[in-house]
Image (cartoon, rainbow, N blue to C red):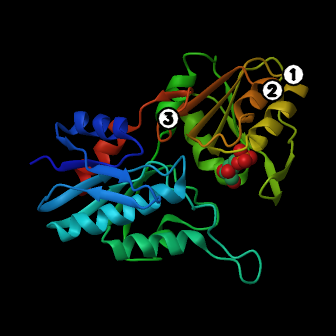
Amino acid sequence: MSPVIIAGSSHPGMALSIAQALGAKVLFPVVEKFPDGETHVVAPSINGTVVYVQTMHPYPNEMLMEMEFTADLLKELGAERIVAVVPYLAYTRQDTRHMDGEGIAVKTMLRMLEKAGVNDIVSVDLHLHRLGLQELSGMTSIRIHEVSAVDALAKESGRYLKKPVVVGPDAESERWAKRAAELLDSHYDVLEKNRISPTEIEIRPKTLDVKGQDVLIIDDIVSTGDTIKKVVESLRAKGANKIAAAFTHGVLSGEDAAAGLYRAGATYLISTNTINNEFSRVDVGPVIAQKLKEIL
Ligand code: R5P
């Protein structure tokens, strides 16, 4: 039997895409704000397993609070298992203590969701730079499942680029760069990135020969755009032909993030719809639905 899908307020389109792939029905809880800013949720009573879809951008804190209230309410109203589909899982970059007293926010977030009754999380291309999936899952009892958008991103880039060299901005992006290169029957390399602060990075270009060639840059998140911008600049300096940047999560903080990439010399931007933006050319609903079929 198809599961019931509950659509959080952040991304009803994603809930519908998943439901269509599963032949399931979507229910929309009422989510309102009281005049003082408190969240007010009215949800249907569902027994058994519920799939709850909520992405965490924009306004990650607001979206998290809505998830807390909704999950707790769904459990109280009869749900036995809550599978939260969180296409963009915020806070995953805060996964370690860089200085005394700093919070490991991803752990706190998972504990909050666990307490509210979430049993599983399905997400896309998780930011697993220091921790592996098992370590992230080991933080709480929540089972965390990951799907990847790389196949679809690589396929989409093929409409625009000719046998591109694939470049990842840092060592952690290697898993995506390698996969994209395999699919495009090309080769890949990863650059060296050093993060000086949340807003400052340094990229060390490699002696990669891209002269006259199309290039596909691939990464999980574009936030300020600085990482990709530096990569684009160095590829332009090396005489690359067309440069496309493909990224799963278009956080695109600040008004200038995407414009800055074009100014640096990127000619095509491709993102998925884990967060809706004007570059969301890839729908991850079907790949999430496939994972749900496996785990439900
Ligand atoms: C970090 O290591 C990620 O994989 C991304 O490269 C990073 O989050 C991008 O951030 P920004 O666009 O602000 O440089």
Give left or right: position of 223 versus 89: right
In space, the residues marked 2 and 3 are separated at their CA atoms by: 31 Å
Identified at 9% across, 48% down, the residue is: 1
Give left or right: position of 112 versus 22: right
Q: Residue furthest bottom?
A: 100
Residue 144: x and y, percent? 40, 63
The amino acid type of the residue labelled 1 equals: Gly
Q: Which type of secondary structure does the marked residue at label 1 adopt?
A: loop
Q: Which residue is mark 1?
A: 239
Closer to the eye: label 2 or 3: 3
Q: Nearer the viewer, residue 86 or 268?
A: 86
Crowd around label 1: few <14 · some 14–19 · many ≥20 (10 Å): some
Quarter of the picture containing the C terminus is bottom left
Identified at 22% across, 68% down, the residue is: 75
Position above or below: 282 against 84: above
Q: Tell me whether the residue at label 2 lies in contact with that at label 1, contact meaning CB atoms closer than 8 angstroms.
A: yes
Residue 228: x and y, percent? 75, 38
Whether label 2 lies within 8 Å of ligand 1 gets the answer no
Residue 265: x and y, percent? 80, 23
Crowd around label 2: few <14 · some 14–19 · many ≥20 (10 Å): some
Q: Residue furthest front?
A: 35
Q: Which residue is mark 2?
A: 210
Q: Which residue is mark 3?
A: 276
Q: Residue furthest right?
A: 237
Position above or below: 2 against 45: above
Identified at 37% across, 71% down, the residue is: 142
Identified at 46% across, 55% down, the residue is: 63
